[in-house]
Amino acid sequence: MKKFQPISELYPHMLHGGDYNPDQWLHMPEIIEEDMRLMKLAHVNTMSLGIFSWTQLEPEEGVYNFSYLDMMIEKIGKNGGKVLLATPTGSKPLWMARKYPEIRMVDQRGYREMTGRRHNHCYNSPIYREKTYEINRRLAQRYGNNDTVIGWHLSNEYANCRTVCYCQTCQAKFREYVKAKYKTLDNLNQSWCTAFWSHTVTDWDLIEAPSDMGEDSVHGLTLDWKRFVSDSYVDYMKSEIAAIREFSDKPVTANLMRNFTRIDYWEMAKHIDVASWDSYPYWHRDDAGIEHADVCFNNDFFRSIKGGKPFLLMESTPSMPNWHDINKLKRPGVNRLGGLQSVSQGSDSVQYFQWRMARGNVEKFHGAVVNHEGSENSRVFREVASLGETLEKLDAIVGCPVESDAAVFYSAENQWALADAQGFNRHNKKHLETIVRHYKQFLDRGINTDIVGYESDFSKYKVVIAPMLYSVSDELIDKIEQYVANGGTFITTYISGMVDKNDLCYLGGFPAGKLKDVFGLWNEEIDSLYPNDSNKVEFGGKEYKAIDYCELLHARGAKVLGSYKEDFYAGMPAVLENSYGKGKAYYIAFRDTGDFLTDFYEGIVAESGLKSSFNGTLAEGVVARSRTDGEFDYVFLLNYRNEERTVNTSAVYTDMETGETRTGEIKLCPFGSIVMKIKK
């Protein structure tokens, strides 16, 4: 595979730095001067600048003052650093909120938000869009050709707010949205199944956004509203980009969020040059490894939504956040571990929130590179500096892709539809948790994995996993059928192939249409188990515990690999394998406690020929991932355990930090890591 171009050709290195808010320290210029000294010591090279600075830049309407940005961009440049320049639009000035109350969000009850906080502006407001466009184009005109500025950081965490907007502007735009989509009321009523409970829409003006205070039972309406909200955020972002593009062609990014479903990131990614995200794991909370598996899943997701192009780790904390219920410190070594974890999966940066702790308000105790003591004499600062030194030795990895033969399906649209389904475990279907548990089977074996969605190409993968694939379009059904027929291995589970893209149930039984032939089965019923219920499944001569869901399947050509042992459906199939064309399709009808998936995927990996990134046997808690430039593989070994681990390899490798050539035994200290360069 060929390397991608660096995210910025002006600076083809691993980016290391973070959110910097010097506008909070303009009254203390000695602090800013000290920051320049400390940045050198910390081996940081890139700062995100200007986030939430709108009032500083436009203190009153139409009056602009860029002197602080002029000063800071010049200082950072002279100090050897680069800038990702933010648009300040995540937080509106108080004067704007007071003068133009219509830009403030309206909640479900019809109450308009007061001033303050952040992100609580209406993204469809013509006035807010006008103000956004003007500040952005002025920034681009002033700094678009500045060599210290290597890219644009759009706003901050789009849609990270308490509610979405239900104002009359949004309601009117939503009616326009569904009218353009369905063309006629008859089409809309059929698609939303509005004959249910006499909810037939007889005039476009009768359509209102779904609400806890109003309509919440028409699932097609709810699904289209979520699509509309997502599209509104994406369209607003596009207007931000358009303003920048008047004067600058430098790459744009937007910092996205972990497991966030208010926006369909597959759609948003089409309009940014590089994906970036904010990673704040609950370190040390989970000995089973699900937490770090979830973070790894997100790393792979944000790489995959841009077609495998390297992404940016835009925010992480070097010590602890302040908004978890319990804000536990990262143990020594974990900042390095988390940073290299992201780099191993395709990140070309390790960035922090924040560079220096704020003196007041809600983020004054959020972790930072520089704490309130203000010097380099802290454990956290030393660990950041050490990681910075390591990243300076990894320039060869910049732009390197991740080669993956396996993929896991994930889509916000599928999650939206499933979350609204009134059935099964109504309040906690564990959709994402289930996906991550399947994904973890590849992670634990060192197998690089991509994430795919409705529009992705499956053909390059040996194995595609799609747990709880509730919502399937006709196009996706065809894609799965062709993928398996052409030799692929496709795996799905209970609650799959049930509804179309309008959340209408498929007739003729589940799974939908041709999927019954692909999987060689018919799903008659599903038993949702109480928390203290369980069943047993026999598979491969062993018994496994079944919890939460047990589907009652009938084999129609599929080979039964496992069966239920208890209840009235004892003896019915629980695990099936079906040969279809040149490939195979597997269906898992129950949720297990983990042991079954481990044994099941052991067979899948062996049969499909999936290869680990690491030429050796991984110890418990050690993860291997790799990137490649086509000539060399860069293999990362990461120890997630707070105890030493030893692994062995027959490969001859170069330690990227020491330059030494080695083979054989590798000792990893608690939370330790190593980056190896191996000839392909």
Image: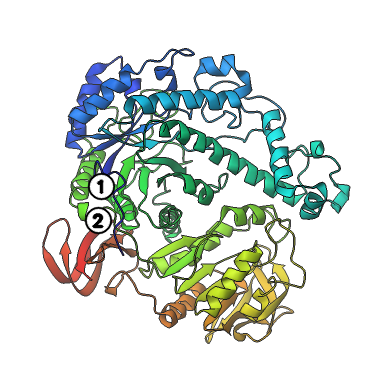
From the image, tell me which residue sits under label 1.
14
SS for dot 1: loop
Does residue 441 sit above or below 116 in this rendering? below
Does residue 356 sit above or below 615 in this rendering? above
Residue 87: assigned label: none
> Where residue 119 sits in the image (x, y, percent)?
53, 31
Asked whether the residues under the numbered discs 1 and 2 touch, taking CB atoms below 8 Å apart as contact, a structural biologist would say: yes
From the image, tell me which residue sits under label 2.
397
Crowding at dot 2, Cα within 10 Å, few <14 / some 14-19 / many 20+, comes out as many
Q: Is residue 617 visible?
A: yes
**Residue lying at 52% horizontally and 14% vertically, measured from the top left:** 95
Crowding at dot 1, Cα within 10 Å, few <14 / some 14-19 / many 20+, comes out as many
Does residue 396 sit above or below 573 in this rendering? above
Does residue 48 sit above or below 361 in this rendering? below
> Where residue 351 sits in the image (x, y, percent)?
32, 41
Q: Residue furthest front?
A: 246
> Marks 1 and 2, Cα distance to the nearest angstrom?
8 Å
Question: Of the residues shown, which amino acid type is indicated by label 2?
Answer: Ile
> Where residue 371 sits in the image (x, y, percent)?
29, 31
